[in-house]
Image (spheres, helix red, strand yellow):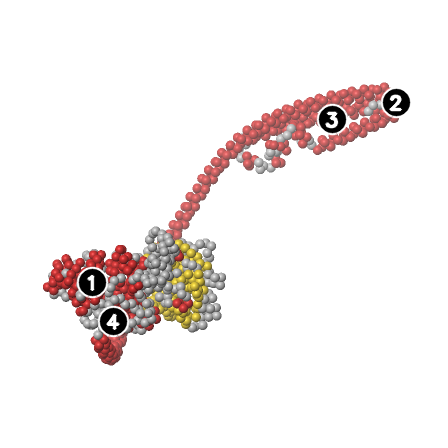
Amino acid sequence: MWLLMAQEIPSLLGTIRGTSMFLTCMETVSKELVSWMRGHESSVCSISVHTSGRYAITTSSDTAQLWDLDTFQRKRKLNVCQSVGIQKVFFLPLSNTILSCFKDNSIFAWECDTLFCKYQLPGPPEDCNILYKVFAVTRDGRILAAGGKSNHLHLWCLEATQLFRIIQMPTKVRAVRHLEFLPDSFDAGFNQVLGVLSQDGIMRFVNIQTCKLLFQIGTVEEGVSSSVISPHGRYITAIMENGSLNVYSVQALTQEINKPPPPLVKVIEDLPNNTVSSNNLKVKVMSGRVQRPARCEERKNQTRVLKQDLTGNLENKENELSEGLNKKRLQVLLKGYGEYPTKYRMFIWRSLLQLPENHTAFSSLMDKGTHAAYLDLQKKYPIKSRRLLRVLQRTLSALAHWSAIFSDMPYLPLLAFPFVKLFQNNQLICFEVVATLIINWCQHWFEYFPNPPINILTMIENVLAFHDKELLQHFIDRDITSQVYAWPLLETLFSEVLTREEWLRLFDNIFSSHPSFLLMTVVAYNTCSRAPLLNCTLKDDFEYFFHHRNNLDLNVVIREVYHLMETTPADIHPNSMLDAFVALTKGQYPIFNQYPKFIVDYQTKERERIRNDELDFLRERQTVENMQAEVDEQRAKDEAWYQKQELLRRAEETRREMLLQEEEKMAQQRHRLAAVKRELEIKEIHLQDAARRRLLKLQQDQREMELRRLEDEIERKVQMRDQEIAATAKDLEMRQLELEAQKRLYEKDITASQEAIAKGIREDTDAHRRKVALEEHMFQKLLENSQMGSRRARRWKEAREKEFHLQSEKKASALSNASRKWLLGQETNAALEHEEVPWLQKQHMDSTCLPQTLRLNDVSDMESSTQIFSRDKPTEWNHTESDLLKNVRDLRRRLTAQAQSSCPHPHLLVT
């Protein structure tokens, strides 16, 4: 057995200090170092070993590595990103699958041989904020339990790759530190009890199906730091926080663990006729087959025992087994179907063999360790699976500690190996099955030890002589004894000549029958194979036939066995020479001494003496070898010293020769360096000249590029000017059209203004004339009234005429100004038509160069001619007009006042 340990050693490389991790593999028996396996750069947090014992996986925070334990070499390496990180990588039990769990809650399953990704578990629900830290898997590898910093546990079904249950722990649990399933001897690997170690130091064991708390270990004052459960689930070892080591018995903590399942077959006995009448007892029997206990959730619907506690003796009491199974009914079932159900075969075997399951007695045998006779078992039987080899070694050692003869039986590994392979997960059952087989079906095998059982072989030969004399005579003629045609089948229990399924069917019948059934099977195997055996003539052919599989129907052999059991005479029948079945006693195993004790003791003493002599010889040889090694080492040191001195002398001479050669080389190198220096100077001059020429050429190229760029710029400017000229011409055309439209508008406005002005002048003239006529009329009346006012009247008349002339001149001047404006607009339009400067430049001309009427910045400012005339009046004319009107008004007032004062009839004066 190997023991893997992770250790941390300091390392120094240059100026960088750090630590490097390596694995130490130790032999548990000899306690010797087997190998060092280096490769990790950080602490190893977990180690997982394959069920075969060939591979191991070590996990650290940044990588996981797969090791081959046969060669102790690294096979594969898993690297991940630092942002993700690895939580745990481990093998699934009883499978070839690797499960890798990362810190982002992603879980992948890989094939061990090809490292092909088989599946990935979906992420947990979004409302679950749990980060997986610890994991546990059932022994059958079907259910994965995961927990972390939360009081929730997630149960995954690895076959369906889905989350099927979430268990909420009590509110006191805030984080889960460790998970481990509690094995059960009767659950076939489908573990239902899960141990949960929380942050408060209490490890609670709950049933994952019923979610019931079964028991707990540890307290708040004395908490559990870490724990481990024994492979069979009987003991729990816990390291407490105070440093103590506690071992708990699961059987004492609860009665629900390791309880056998209810019996498969239930018996309903009929009531005696004289006790209860048929009218008083009515039972309704439902049609259908017998219900068998399910493996998972359907286990609640188990078959109940229907029993009547009635007086009277039951028939066939000797056929009733301890668990309630009836042996005769099992035999009927076996003859009908040829075998027991695969699901319940192990349970039926254990019931038929009435195994006591003496845990204490078996533990005492196991505590004695590996027997000295089986220390080198792997050399004689090189089994590929290390796990299977260890189980076989422990089982054989327990048998050897139970009885001394089993340490000297050369065929015991062959006899026990099929059962070891079948019960490798339960070593107690394996040991008790082999021990029961030896006590009952191997009776009288050891009376002629160390020779084969001559008495048993004689029984087989007598039965064969009675049923097939021709075949026996053929064996005698070819000098083939029972040690050739019978003993190979017995010492291997037919495991070499039958397949696994055939072997299981055969032992279904053997365990259900009398111990003589095994001997009759040997005879039936020969009689059913008589045709090929009669054709064999060489001894090697016979030996090959009884050590290899043959084309033989096992059902025919079993029917032949039952026929032989019934037709064999009593005087030669093995039943008369073999005892009936005897089960192992409870509590302690019986003493097995059915062998020639003096021979075994003598062989044991001789073997012990030979072993001691061999040890003495080995010690003496080791001493001689050590002395010889010391002498050889001293001689080697002396020779090494002389060789070293000679090497130093030769090295000194060599160094001197090398020094002279180096001096010569230095001188030659100086000459070569001087020549190279001159060449370099010449090359430098040439390079400078070439660089200067390249620079001049570069400057010339740059100037040419600048000229080409200027030419391109000129061409681009010319193109832009032509485009602008064309655009300006288009704008001038549009402006000319606009000016023509404005011109026509101006002409229309001026004509309308002139007509309106002329009309106004005529109206004013007519009004003035009417007013003058009225005034003259009035004046004439005044003259008539007063001759003395004639002079003032004449003056007043002159003033009125002067006022009329002034108004006429004013209107004529306004008409003249409007005509002059229209003429100036005509000249401006003509000038714009012949202008070659762009319109945009003309708009920036000084406004003082043109009269106010030619400022055409906004066409929308054009209004009626009356408004234009009123805007263009000079300030001086406005001032003169107001003065004249004022003077006229004053003159009128004076004249009126004089007239009133001089007129005798003032009421006749009209103003």
- Residue at 27% x, 59% y is 331
Does the CB distance between marks 2 and 4 fall below 8 Å? no
Does label 2 or label 1 sit earlier along the sequence? 1
Q: For the N terminus, give its image quadrant.
A: bottom left
User: Which label is found at residue 905?
Assistant: 2
Does label 1 or label 4 sit earlier along the sequence? 4
Where residue 802 appears, as percent x and y from the top left, is 76, 25
Numbered disc in front, either 1 or 4: 1
Q: Which residue is mark 1?
A: 520
Numbered disc in front, either 2 or 1: 1
Number of numbered callouts drawn: 4
SS for dot 1? helix
Q: For the C terminus, give its image quadrant.
A: top right
| Amino acid, disc 1 | Met
SS for dot 3? helix
Q: Which residue is mark 3?
A: 806
Residue found at the far left of this picture: 477
Numbered disc in front, either 2 or 4: 4
Does label 3 or label 1 sit earlier along the sequence? 1
Does label 3 or label 2 sit earlier along the sequence? 3
Does label 2 or label 4 sit earlier along the sequence? 4
- Visible in this render: residue 74? no
Does the CB distance between marks 1 and 4 fall below 8 Å? no
| Amino acid, disc 4 | Phe
In the image, residue 100 above or below residue 784: below
- Residue at 68% x, 24% y is 757
Residue 375 found in image quarter: bottom left
In the image, residue 846 above or below residue 415: above
SS for dot 2? loop
| Amino acid, disc 2 | His
